[in-house]
Each structure stands twice: as structure tokens, then as C-alpha cells.
Image (cartoon, grey):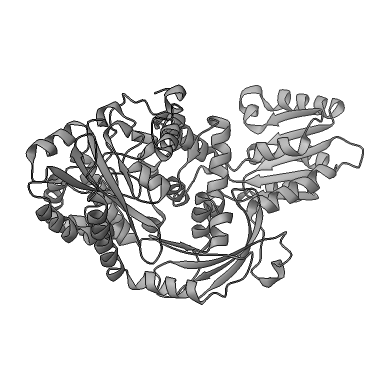
Amino acid sequence: MSEKEIDTGTVRPEIALSWRRSHLSGVNPSTSITINTTGVDPNSRLLRAAAPVLDQISQQIVDTGFCVLLADRDGRIVASLRADDRRIRRAVERLGVVNGSLLGEDCAGTNAVGTPLEVGHSMVIHGEEHYLDSFKGISCYGQPVIHPVTRRVEGILDMTGAGARANPLFAPFLARAAADIETRLLEGSKASEQRLFSAFQRVPNRNHVAVAAIGDDFLLTNRTAMDLLATADHVSLRSLAVDLAPDQSRLVTVHLVSGAQATVKVDRVSGAKGGALFTIQEVDRPERAAIPRSRDHRLSHSERLQEELQRARRRVDALSISGEPGTGRTTAVADVVGESSVSWFNATSIAFDGTEAWTSRLIQAIRERDAVVVEQIELLPASVLPIISDLVAAEEGSPRIILTSGPISDLPPAIAGVATRCPTRIHLAPLRERHAEIAELAQSILAGLAPGYRIAPNAVEALAAAQWSGNIAELKVVLRSAVDASSSPRIDVPDLPEDYRVTARAARLGGRERAERQAIAEALKSCGGNKSHASAQLGISRSTLYARMRALDVTG
């Protein structure tokens, strides 16, 4: 479908806009439907609320020639097709519309699931108005299911039939059904969500102050927060509350995805199962004093590091940069030295070059260069330490000496003694202590690896739950693998290497629960995802397996 066809004016304006969005997303009208059942929870809150309503609909559409299906908030079909007519059911299944089918506009173009998700309201899509050629023989009506508390779209209820025109009675029929599901969602709201909602309601309404309440499966924001925060910001905010005790608070400064700097007050809500209330204000707002600073106010590691690097660039004395392998020590050195005339030496080369040859080259560089960098000083032999120590203590006018090493607390006393003689010292925190910055770091790395790619919030949350023993270097490897595995410019959890598909909720499990989670994951993997075989292998019923998968946040 070309832009020329889109601009012919032969379709409704809202359909023309949807066609353009589909075209810009790279959807081919002849494409087949993508199916992805990873992460589909057969006992999700949406399905529990919708099940009796779908059963009732099934009885009401007998002999009508229509079928009804339910999609989640990602545009993925999660309910079995409900149809009394086998012909229409089989016809829809032949189109690829089955459990796990992805019908978002970015996957399937204009349709009665993806388009209502995009525009936020119900829509009827007549046969030829579909973007995919294969869908042009059916007509559908999509009705959003909106959570009464969060006002977030939880899913789409869709009614589909053969023919070029949709029945006008679809609209009131599905609207009533969606309202019934919404009522059941409200009745089934968890007590923890209700506590979080109450905390949100108690916050005074102030201009230019954004408020967000975030739980494991709960997000509520005021209008200011909707305008200020990107989806990736929600993930970063959630990580700020992970190590807080119930009713504990913290004040921090963060950089938002938009580039704005904001002061965030985090209040962990008691009884909300990890949920927290966030009060966010841009620091350049004149009303910023409305959120008082506290003793817990602190800069992020990235902010502090940038300040330290800036100070180090202005100095000429010896500098020590320490941190675990992979934390970016060499990158930090390069930032400090800039365009200076620099010689780089790595202590690992001594094993190949020999101590004498390595030392001779070092001394020669001291005579010729503005700065000399010696990396991994923990590997230096004892005979070289006095030379390095003298260079560190050299008077002003001598070339600048920059040393890198592991954390100073982990160094042998003699090596640590050399590093601590440097007047300027910078320590790089390990990535596992920078979970709040994962979204920003990951997107920055992606910009270098694959310009135009972006990382989905659920994938950011999974990355934030990892331990990162290899630090930023490991993160780069994981993202490179995800780019290779992804079929689109959006990195989702299934694109990550298997060991990194862990949510923040799973990361908070205790030792025994982690062992149980691992056992279930391994059983599912060995059984190719077949839950009946996995439950038999584990010696539990399938219903128990589903219950434990939900409790332990196991996908599969």
C-alpha cells in the first residue's frame, strides 16, 4: 500500500491516519500474522475478569456467524475464539488469528484490536479498511476494556464476522460486555493496589508537580506526570523504591528520558507489595522548593561521575580511576585526557614484553608525552612499583600519570598504596548498584550499536533485575545479542538472552523461592514449554504449576 493510495480520500480520515501509521511502522500488506505466546498468563487478572463474560457472549452470538476474541494491552490475543459457527472460527484461524497472535498496528496494521489500542477508543473496521490484504474479507468491531481505577486500557474485546460491512449493533453489544469486564476488574482489584490508590488520592493537587503510583502491575499518574514521564522513566522510578522498607522515603535527583533533570520524592507504601508513590518536579521550575530537600538527597552515580570527570579534566596531577572490570575505566580515562598527547600502557603486556622492555618504553613515553596511562596496576610486578610511585609523586611540570585498577579496597597493600597517593581519585560503581540508571545506560548503548532501536519498558525492568557481574561491558554484550535476535527496532523481553529474562519481582524472591523458580523454568525448557509434561516431570498438577508460575513470575 503506497502513500498515493493512502491519500486518495476514499477512506474515513481515522482509517487513513491508521494506514499511514501502519506504513511508517514498516508493515507489509501481504505479511503474515506473528504469533508469540511467551509471557501469556492463562490466569491473568484480565482473563479472570473476562471469562464469565465471554461465556455469556458465546451463548448470545449463537447462529449469528460472528466470533469474539480478547486481546491484552499489548495487542496479543489471549482468549480462545468464541464462535458457534465452525466455518467462521476456522476462517479466522486460517488468517493466523489464534492465541498469541500479535495484532498491534506495528505488527498487523489497521485492525479492530491494534487501532483501538492506538487511538484509545472503540472502532469499527470494515473489510477493505483493514491494512492487511488477508483481513479484507472480514469486518470487526473493537472495544477497549479500561480499568476503572487506573484508567489504563487492559485489553480489547473484538467481534469479527465475514463480510464487507460490520453490523451496527456491534457497538452497544460489546460496550455492555466491556463494562461488565471492567466491573469485575474493579471487584477483583488487589488490596495492595487499593492501598496504593488511596495513597495517590491523598497527595494534594499542585501545579507543575507530577505524581505517580507504581506497583508490580499498577500504574496511576496525574496529568502532569503523563506529560513529563516517558514509559522508560516508569521503570527507572520503580527501581528507586526496590531497597526501601515500607513507609520509608527517599529524595533523589534523576535525569528523565526527555533530558530534563527532576527531583523525585519516593515513598514506599506499606501493604502495597513493593508499590511506591513518586512525587516528581523538574528542578528548573520556580516551585521546586515545594519538595523540601532531605538528608537522603543524593546525586545519581552518572551525575556524580560527570562532576568528578569535569574536575579531573581541569587538573594536571596524578589521577587514579578504580572500579570492577567492565565499569568503564578506560572510557573514563579517555574522557579525561581528551585530545592530549597520551601513551597507554597495560600491565598485562608485561607478561609478553618482559619487565625490562615494558619499563623502558614507559620511561621513554614519560619524556615525550603530555600524559601516560597505566592500566590494571594490580598486575604490576613489585620491581616496577617504585617507578610508578615516583611518577605519581613527581612535581608539577612532569607528564600527568593516570592509573586504573580494580576497587582500591580489593588491591594488595603495596598496589593500594600507590593508587592512594594520587591526589585525584575516581571510583566507578558497579552496574548492580546503578539499577535506576539501567534505562538511560541501555538506550545510550543501543544508540551506538543500532541507531533507531529502542528498548521496551518490560525489557528494561528485566535488565534492572540482573546482577551484572561483568558490569557495563556485559550489558553491551547482552544488548548486541538482543539486537541480533530482534525482528523489529523494539527490544522486548523475548529478544534478551534467556538468562536475562527475569523481572524485578522475581529478583526480590527469597532463596528457596528462587530455587523453586529455577526448577520450574528448567522443567519448562526441557519439555519445550509443554506445561502438562513439565508438571508431570515436577510431580505436581498442572493447576499447581500455573499457580506457582504466577506466584514466582515464571513465563513460558
Residue 510, picture quadrant: bottom left
Q: Relative to the observer, which residue lies in front, 200 or 445?
A: 200
In the rendered view, does 121 fall on the left or right side of 452?
A: left
Q: Is residue 411 visible?
A: yes
Provide residue 6's location: percent of width, then percent of height: 43, 28
Q: Is residue 269 above or below residue 462?
A: below
Screen quadrant of the C terminus: top left
Provide residue 267's location: percent of width, then percent of height: 53, 71
Provide residue 518's location: percent of width, then percent of height: 29, 51
Q: Is residue 484 above or below residue 274?
A: above
Q: Is residue 360 above or below residue 478?
A: above
In the rendered view, does 522 fall on the left or right side of 205?
A: left
Q: Relative to the observer, which residue lies in front, 348 or 276?
A: 276
Q: Residue at x 66, y 33 (%)?
A: 347
Residue 38, picture quadrant: top left
Provide residue 492's location: percent of width, then percent of height: 40, 41
Q: Relative to the observer, which residue lies in front, 506 or 289?
A: 289
Q: Is residue 417 above or below residue 36?
A: below
